Every structure is written in C-alpha cells, then in structure tokens.
Image: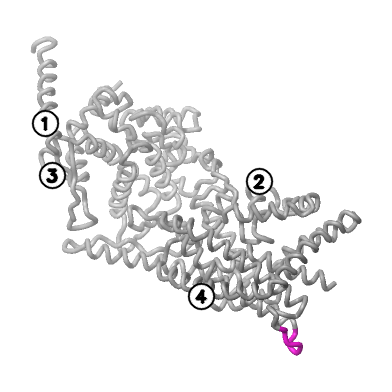
Amino acid sequence: MRTVITISLNGNAYQLDAGGYEAMRAYLHVAEQRLAGNPDQGEILADLEQAIADKCRRYLGPHKNVVSAEEVAEVLREMGPVDGDAGEAAHPGAGLGGGLGAGAAAGGLGAVGGSSGTENGVGGATTGDPAARGWGLGGGAGGTDGGFGAGVAAGQSGAASNGTGGLGGTAAGGGVGTGAGASNTGGAAQSEAPRRLYQIREGAVISGVCKGLAAYLNIDVSIIRILFVALVILTGGVWILIYIVMMFVIPYAQTSEQHAAAHGWPFNAEELVARAKAHYAQFRENGTKWHRRQYREQRRAWRTQHKAWKEQQRHWERWGGLNGPPPPPPPPPGWVAGQPPNPSYQGQLLNGVISPILAVVGVLVGFTFLFMLLSLVRHHTIFGWWWPHEIPLWVGIVFLVLLYRAITSPLHQARYAAYYGAPVGHAWVALIGALVWLALLSFLAWEAWQHWDDVADFFQRVVIFWQDLIERRATSPGDSEHAALYFLAFGVPSCVLPGYVATRELKSHGEIDRVDMLGEAADGDVVDAGLSDGAYSLQ
Amino acid sequence: MAVNEKFGAIRKGLLEFLVLKVIAADRVYVADMLKKLAETEFATQEGTLYPLLSRMRRDGLVDYEWKESEAGPPRKYYELTASGRSQLAELDDYWRVINKTIEDLGPKG
C-alpha cells in the first residue's frame, strides 16, 4: 500500500505517490529559489508546472491514475535542472560549468533513491540504493552554484560526501545524466521548519495562549500553565491583563500549515500522513462527538474538492474536442487533513478592516452578556426584568448562554468569511446575520443605558472582587491556593457548564461552522469568569 | 576531458542563437523547439529553455501568443520580434566570420 497525494500543477490535479510528491516538491522548490529575483518567476514556474503536468499525463491511463515515484523521477530528469542564471549564462562564454547534458543529478538536486527512496521518505538521512536515480531535497543547499556546474553541485549536495557523491557528480558532469551515488534525503532541510507563535484552540483551557507558547517553546503545556498561574498570583492579577493582550495579539493557528508551524513540525506530506494516522487512531479510540464532527467536516471538504475535480473534468472535455480527449485527471482520493482554504489576499484585506470592528463589538457583547449573567445570578433580574421564581435559575443561565451563542455565531462567521473571502453567499448570510445582531446589540446597549446604575454596579463589583481576591492572598498566603483554584476556574472547561453542553448538542446537529465552536474561547472566558464569579459569591 | 564536455560551454552559449534560428523558421511552442533541438547536439530541457525564453522575451527578441491546441491546454507560440530578426542576422554574419576564421587557421588540408 502506498500513500497517494493529490497536487495541483498549474491548475490540473494529479495524484503522485508520496515519494514522487517529495521529489516534485523539492524540484519546484529549487526552481523557485533559483528563479528568485527573476521578474518572470511566476510565469516560468507556471510554464514548468504545465510541462511537468503534460509529461505526467503520459503515464496516466484509464486504469492508472497515480504517477509513481519512478515516473516522477523520470519526468523531472527530462525536465532538467532549472537554469536560474539563464540571464547571464546564456551569453557566450559565461556558462563555464559543464555540458548541456548535465543530466539528472545536475543542478544540485541530490539524487534520492527514486525507486527505493519511495519507502524511505523524509524522516531523516537515509541512504538510498546506490543505483537509484531521482530527485530529492538533499540538493536544496547545493543549488547555489552558478549555471551548469552540475557535477560540482551533485558532489556538494550529498552530505554523503563519502566519495560516492563525487562520483555521481562526475557522471552527471559527463552528460551521462544518472546521478549514481549514495543519496541523502536531506535531513537538514527538514529540521529547519519554521516555528511561529500561534494560539492553539484545540485542547485550550482559555484561549490557547499557553498551548501555543508550549508548542513554541517545546515545553509541556502544564508547566506553562502552572507558570502562568504563578505569575498571576505574583503580579497580583496584572498578568491576566497581559494574557488578555496576548489573546488578542497572537494569531490563531487555523490551517494545518499554521499548526505545523506552531509546533515547528515540518509541513510536508509524510508528516501530514503520520499525523492523520495518529488522529485516526485517536478517533477510533474515543469516537466522541467532537471527532465525529471533525470527520463530517473532512467529508465536506472532500466533497468540495470533488466538485472542483468534476469541473476540471469538464474542462478537459472541452479541450479534448476532436482528437480524443486526454484522460481526465483522476478524482481526489479523499481528504487527509481538513483545513480551511487559504485566505485570499482580498480576504485578508477585508479582514483587516472588518475584523477589528467585529472584535470590538464582540467584546462589547461579551461584557453585556456578562452583565446580564451577573445580574441574573445576583439579583434574579435581567435589565430590570425579574426572573420568575417558579423557573429555576439554571434555566435562565442556559437560556442566556444559548442566546449569547446564537448572537455571536453570525459574528464569527462574518469574521471567518471576511478572512477567507469566500464563499460569497456564505459571506452575505453572515453579514446579514451580523447586521441583525448589531441591531440587537444597539437595543441591548440602549437598555443598558436605561439601567445605568446596574452597569456601574457591575463594574464596581468586578473591581471589588479583584481587590478582595488580591487582599485575601496578601493577608493569608495559605489562601493562595484558593486564588490559584480560582484562576483555574476561569478555565474550567466550558463543557462543565450545562448551557454549553446543550449548545454543543445543538451545534452538532446544526449547520453552524466549525469556527464558531472553536472560535469562541475569547468570549468564552468571560462566560466562565462570570459563572465563577457567581459561584464564588454564592459560597 | 571528453570533447563533448569541452564544448559544453560553447553549446550553452550558442543555445540562444539556435533558439532564435528555430523560432525564425516557424512559429513554435516549447515542445516543438525541444523536439527540433533534441535531434542536434543542442538537445536541451524545459528547465533550461523556459528561463532562457523568458529572458529573451524580456530582451525583446521574441514574443509569444496563446493559441488553443486541439488537445490539452492552450500553448504559447513563440515568434521573433523585429529586433530578434536583426539580432539573428547579426549572429548569422558573426557565425560565418568565426567559421571562416576556424577554417583559415591551421594547416591547410
């Protein structure tokens, strides 16, 4: 069994097996690097992709829809190294390197076992079959040599500088074009995956700051959390403000690529597959609702992909015309990691404008909600309206939480849609939702104005509460445990709240987007804080 | 060092000249060019040709237009510009001079 990866080459979908994918990725990566600074870089890359696609199609037929690693290696060998210095080297006398027939190993693409390397994959430095030919990442570093110095490049690139690499180099320089020699899959290129600081929602207690930081620093998240709690206590609560700032400043890891960057994992096929496998094992182990929902999302993503493929097929039929259409690209095999589409540039721009506004509004709503909740718990009243005695209070809390969720979900959808720019219909629905929601908000604000005393009272209480807490810690150090517990209570997983569970049930049946579910924590804390506050005051 | 290898740099330098010649003969797309060159000592590959063509286009020697093909996606068909033609003529003359020099030098057979 082999892993298959679907790629798009200049708009055409192709399936490659994992080894072939790595080789092609490496080839295009090197091409991109070599063409860096070339004003036509994008165009040349598109042309190259198209040429690769044409060559790959040769290997596909009605009963064969995966291009094997060997075939990819052959295609790339035919393509030849990308001549980054075409500008200079093409002038007479400039190209001092080697022959034109520099061959497969030319251009610093270290030979990765095309045949045997398939299984070797990426993990680390693996020595391929000496007779193997192909392309790999190994040469990425060696690709700096000018022009056609093929032999030299191959020699350098092999961290396998055990002589055999040099041998491969000579062979290539001689125009033989077989990069014979020990191959190196370039562990170096892999380990240098960029690491970025993100917030990680999955499994977060509050917003994912600690989780992201833990991933970034490669420390167990519990240590970071304990540290944060300690800092809160030591700074007398000021750290909470810092946390909130971080919450707003540090971006969320949303795509698989960002998740990988958060952990500093290399983002490539092998890793994705490995993680997908691990995920699946987890899924089997505890088939919770959450996992089932994930699965549905993946299926949805797959359907979208499939639709794109269908369109492509039509495209082929159109071009096919008279001479018998070339075989359409094969259908996608399924979906490995569900991830939102990459944000378009316009989407990001739009997001830049809308998002801060929506964020501010979101905070305001959060506070309003908090106020209502507090008011309900403490005075059994919402904006002056008395909660009927015959209905238990928790019903009111559930009601409020549900209301809050219902109100904020269009907001989150709007943010999401603004960010990703598409689909348009979705964005409009979200926008209308957001407008309705704004109207509601204005009404609430007006109400709050009418009951200004309560609002003022609420803020006063929050301040007093914090003062109280800090004082208590100062006067009796033993009680700091209590404060720590309190802080943790912020993060008591929202699922403890009956209202939340109910919402989750609702969502798992409804059509509400994933982001609503995950993108809620920022406001969710406020919810938790409110409830904890209530619980605390009731003690 | 094989002769083949020795002249690598020369072939490389002449590639642009050859490409100009191929394009002058007929309006061609890249696969055509590769096929024509493959039969000669100047066999080359996409990885070389695309960057070269892009530079030649920037230099104003060649231009292309998209043409729909009977099978597959549209292709770029290349043709020479006026300055490309004049450069080709110049190179042709120069090549003749070089050839003559080579023949004139050395022992006469």
Kind of residue at disc 4: Val
Q: Amino acid at mark 2?
A: Leu
Residue labelled with disc 4 = A436
- Name the amino acid, label 3: Arg
Is there CB contact under 8 Å for labels 2 and 3? no
- Considering the numbered disc 1 on the image, is that residue within a helix, a strand or a loop? helix
Q: Separation of disc 4 and disc 2 at Cα?
A: 43 Å
**For numbered disc 4, what is the local secondary structure?**
helix
Q: Position of residue A321 (x, y in %)?
A: 18, 64
Task: Report in which chain the residue with disc 1 lies.
Answer: B
Measure how far apart labels 3 and 1 are at the Cα level. Answer: 17 Å
Q: Pointer 3: what residue?
A: B27
Q: Would you say residue A391 sits in the magenta stretch?
A: yes
Task: Give the labeled residue for mark 2.
Answer: A217
| Residue name at image x 13 percent, y 44 percent | B27
Distance between the Cα atoms at labels 4 and 1? 69 Å
> Which is more foreground, mark 2 or mark 3?
2
Residue position for label 1: B86
Residue range of the region highlighted in magenta in the rendering: A386-392
Q: Helix, strand, or loop for circle 2?
A: helix
In front: mark 3 or mark 1? 1
- Judge the density around disc 4: few (<14), some (14-19), many (≥20) Cα neighbours within 10 Å: few
Left/right placement of residue A485 relative to residue A515 reads right
> What chain letter is assigned to the residue under label 2?
A
Pinpoint residue A370: horizontal percent, then vertical percent: 69, 70
Labels 2 and 3 share a subunit: no
